[in-house]
């Protein structure tokens, strides 16, 4: 693996005059520059940014795309392994339980979170289509508002070029997968890219079949200084759910599925359509704009244990939105360089959330019928100022407004949204380059959290408006790079919330609980080393602490307790070795320490693991590569755990699994 800047990071560094100090990223894999990247670029954010190269992403064998974030440092993975509700990734001391979704997800720059912040739209993308992934940490990025509580992640897919890339895979648990990515670019500036992907697997556990089909098309035309394009995506998946096991059940047979889950499972359909515009309006002025429509339909049957009834959960959402930014480079005497940027975005949501109690998929009683609209719009201004080539200052300010209404059709009642007011979010970034290869950086900023689902509205007993929960955070870091053979980065950070709320996941009302004032802090350390042209190594370790600093008055005993499902330690790393031309050997792994299951911290700690994976690949001809991958090489026995109020329930993770693949590139 070679260490370069990210797709947009590198592109913007080439174009922007303030590139010298903007080197705070840590990359894993080969990164290919595919676009100029000016307005709304990640290069203007001086915080800890991690980048996964397309070469790493494209050769992964995963049931779900979120699993690939295991290759990036400091990421917590939450693996429910329940059909289409498979899991999530999270960062900066937040968990992936779904109560608080703190990462803004984007696909090719298009917002891709559900109303509750969930990441179901990530299923639209499969590995072979990915050109790179950018993960931005912290509170100082002004480009995004809603759901960007702890940072944001942008999955970039292939654009342009003329190629045909196909990969066929088969292996453990009766898994078969086919992916085809193709591009055709003409000399008149027109490019088109297509993707077809299909995966079918029986799953590690009984009653865990998954069937997924993905389709995508991209069309772009360059006309002088203007580039316009369109992207269309469609995904459908059908899956069974193996359910959860008690500790005794798991000890007896980790792969079993209990009779209570016999009819659990669901279907998910995803759609995304977007229009894109990039234009150089003048020599120092550029514009980027996007418009999109996202559709989400999830129909799930689930029974968590024999003590509760099965439920049908039906979610239907449409999101319509747009983003734009102007990027200006004035010449100001006495300053080395200046960049001014102003941008905005809006999203209109039409959401329906319905639930029933069921018996083997036959409805017995409806418990929820929510129909609600939400509109969120915001804007930001940002300046990147270089008084000298070795100093960069980036002040920014963002604001967001929320409106909408909520109808409870079962109660035949309508309610207004909380008047959150203008949510102000000042931010500041700083970078100093005292010597070549060394960057000192720091940042401070505010983000926000509001209620999701019914929790955003004044539903009785609430009759007065709630304030948003304000997250305030800072970071101080240092990065050293010696050419392409050595990169070191370390950062300390802290983030507090004024009044954090968490969604009640199993409550028909869809309401929330008040967790209280929270405090998160941590240390991140990353290193990559290429001592030989044939050998690349990288490693990362994060130490984090997430506590309830001031609890809700109803739960005073939780003061100082750990927030549930947040491990204290995270680690990841890998080795790539090419002993001969055409042969590649890779070993990588990730893991974490244990976490608390509840905010009360009184039912034990679970969830620690260390998992290693291995891949061997041989370039048979210039066009054909053969590969074998073994996941969970040591057959580590670990599981996701949660507590339902009376007992601890487990979802055992897959054991050792081997896959073989053939890849053809032309």
Image (spheres, rainbow, N blue to C red):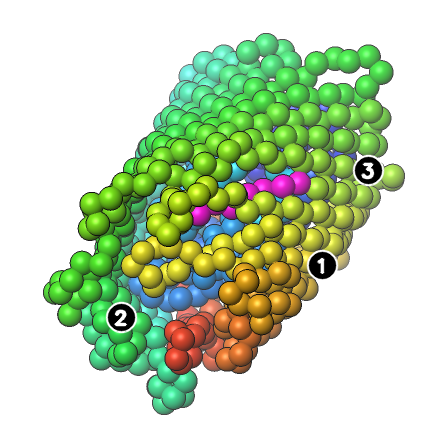
Residue 239 appears anywhere in the view: yes
Is residue 572 or residue 199 the one in the foreground?
A: 572
Q: In this view, does 489 lie to the left or right of 434?
A: left
* Residue under the image location 19 percent in, 70 percent down: 263
What residue does disc 2 label?
303
**Disc 2 or disc 1, which is closer to the eye?**
2
Residue 447 shown in magenta: yes
**Image quadrant assignment for residue 16:** top right
**Image quadrant assignment for residue 327:** top right
Q: Is 587 located above or below residue 279 in the figure? A: below
Q: In this view, does 383 lie to the left or right of 188?
A: right
Q: Of the two numbered discs 2 and 1 on the same chain, state the one appearing first in sequence.
A: 2
* Residue under the image location 74 percent in, 13 percent down: 331
Q: Of the two numbered discs 2 and 3 on the same chain, state the one appearing first in sequence.
A: 2
Per the image, label 2 sits on a secondary structure element best described as loop
Q: Is residue 183 left or right of residue 146?
A: left
Give the magenta-colored segment's residue range.
445-453
Is residue 79 or residue 419 the one in the foreground?
A: 419
Per the image, label 3 sits on a secondary structure element best described as strand
Q: Which mark is residue 432?
A: 3
* Residue under the image location 50 percent in, 71 percent down: 598
Q: Where is residue 130 in the image (x, y as percent from the top left)?
A: 46, 45
Q: Where is residue 398 in the image (x, y as percent from the top left)?
A: 59, 31
Q: Where is residue 422 in the image (x, y as percent from the top left)?
A: 53, 31
Mark 2 vs mark 1, CA separation in Å: 39 Å
Q: Residue 446 carries which label?
A: none
Q: Position of residue 364 (x, y in %)?
A: 13, 65
Q: Is 9 located above or below residue 366 in the figure? A: above
What residue does disc 1 label?
523
């Amino acid at each position: 693996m070679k260490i370069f800047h990210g797709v947009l990071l590198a592109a913007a560094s080439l174009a922007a005059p303030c590139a010298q100090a903007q080197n705070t990223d840590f990359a894993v894999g080969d990164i290919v520059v595919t676009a100029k990247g000016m307005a709304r670029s990640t290069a203007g954010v001086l915080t800890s940014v991690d980048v996964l190269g397309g070469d790493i992403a494209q050769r992964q064998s995963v049931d779900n795309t979120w699993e690939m974030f295991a290759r990036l440092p400091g990421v917590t993975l939450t693996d429910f392994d329940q059909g289409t509700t498979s899991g999530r990734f999270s960062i900066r001391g937040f968990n992936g339980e779904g109560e608080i979704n703190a990462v803004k997800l984007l696909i090719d720059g298009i917002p891709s979170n559900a109303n509750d912040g969930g990441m179901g739209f990530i299923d639209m993308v499969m590995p072979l289509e990915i050109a790179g992934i950018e993960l931005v940490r912290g509170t100082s990025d002004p480009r995004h508002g809603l759901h960007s509580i702890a940072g944001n992640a942008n999955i970039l897919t292939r654009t342009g070029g003329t190629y045909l890339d196909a990969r066929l895979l088969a292996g453990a648990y009766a898994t078969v997968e086919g992916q085809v990515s193709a591009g055709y670019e003409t000399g008149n500036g027109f490019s088109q890219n297509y993707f077809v992907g299909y995966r079918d697997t029986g799953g590690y556990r009984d009653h865990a079949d998954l069937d997924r089909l993905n389709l995508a098309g991209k069309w772009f035309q360059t006309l002088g200084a203007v580039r316009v394009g369109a992207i269309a995506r469609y995904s459908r998946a059908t899956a069974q759910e193996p359910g959860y096991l008690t500790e005794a059940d798991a000890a007896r047979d980790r792969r079993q599925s209990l009779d209570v889950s016999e009819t659990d499972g669901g279907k998910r359909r995803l759609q995304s359509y977007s229009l894109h515009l990039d234009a150089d309006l003048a020599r120092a002025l550029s514009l980027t704009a996007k418009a999109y429509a996202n559709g989400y339909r999830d129909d799930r049957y689930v029974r968590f244990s024999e003590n509760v009834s099965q439920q049908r959960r039906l979610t239907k959402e449409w999101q319509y939105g747009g983003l734009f930014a102007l990027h200006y480079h004035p010449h100001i005497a006495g300053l080395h360089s200046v960049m001014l940027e102003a941008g905005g975005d809006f999203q209109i949501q039409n959401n329906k959330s319905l639930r029933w109690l069921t018996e083997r998929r036959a409805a017995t009683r409806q418990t929820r019928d929510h129909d609600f609209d939400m509109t969120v719009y915001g804007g930001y201004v940002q300046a990147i100022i270089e008084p000298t080539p070795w100093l960069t200052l980036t002040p920014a300010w963002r604001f967001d407004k929320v409106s909408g209404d909520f109808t409870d059709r079962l109660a035949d009642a309508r309610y207004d949204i909380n008047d959150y007011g203008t949510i102000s979010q000042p931010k500041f970034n700083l970078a100093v380059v005292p010597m070549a290869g060394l960057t000192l950086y720091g940042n401070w900023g505010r983000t926000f959290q509001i209620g999701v689902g019914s929790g955003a509205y004044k539903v009785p007993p609430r009759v007065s408006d709630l304030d948003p929960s304000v997250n305030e955070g800072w970071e101080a870091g240092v990065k050293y790079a010696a050419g392409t053979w050595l990169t070191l980065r370390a950062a300390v950070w802290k983030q507090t919330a004024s009044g954090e709320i968490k969604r009640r996941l199993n409550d028909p009302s869809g309401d929330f609980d008040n967790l209280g004032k929270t405090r998160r802090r941590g240390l991140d350390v990353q290193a990559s080393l290429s001592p030989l042209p044939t050998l690349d190594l990288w490693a990362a370790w994060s130490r984090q602490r997430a506590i309830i600093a001031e609890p809700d008055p109803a739960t005073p005993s939780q003061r100082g307790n750990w927030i549930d499902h947040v491990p204290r330690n995270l680690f990841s790393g890998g080795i790539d070795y090419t002993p001969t031309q055409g042969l590649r050997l890779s070993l990588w792994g990730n893991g974490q320490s244990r976490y608390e299951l509840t905010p009360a911290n009184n039912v034990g700690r679970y969830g620690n693991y260390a998992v290693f994976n291995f891949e061997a690949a041989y370039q048979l001809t210039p066009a054909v590569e053969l590969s074998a991958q073994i996941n969970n090489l040591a057959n580590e026995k670990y599981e996701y755990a949660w507590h339902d109020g009376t007992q601890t329930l487990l979802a055992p993770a897959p054991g050792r699994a081997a896959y073989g693949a053939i890849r053809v590139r032309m």
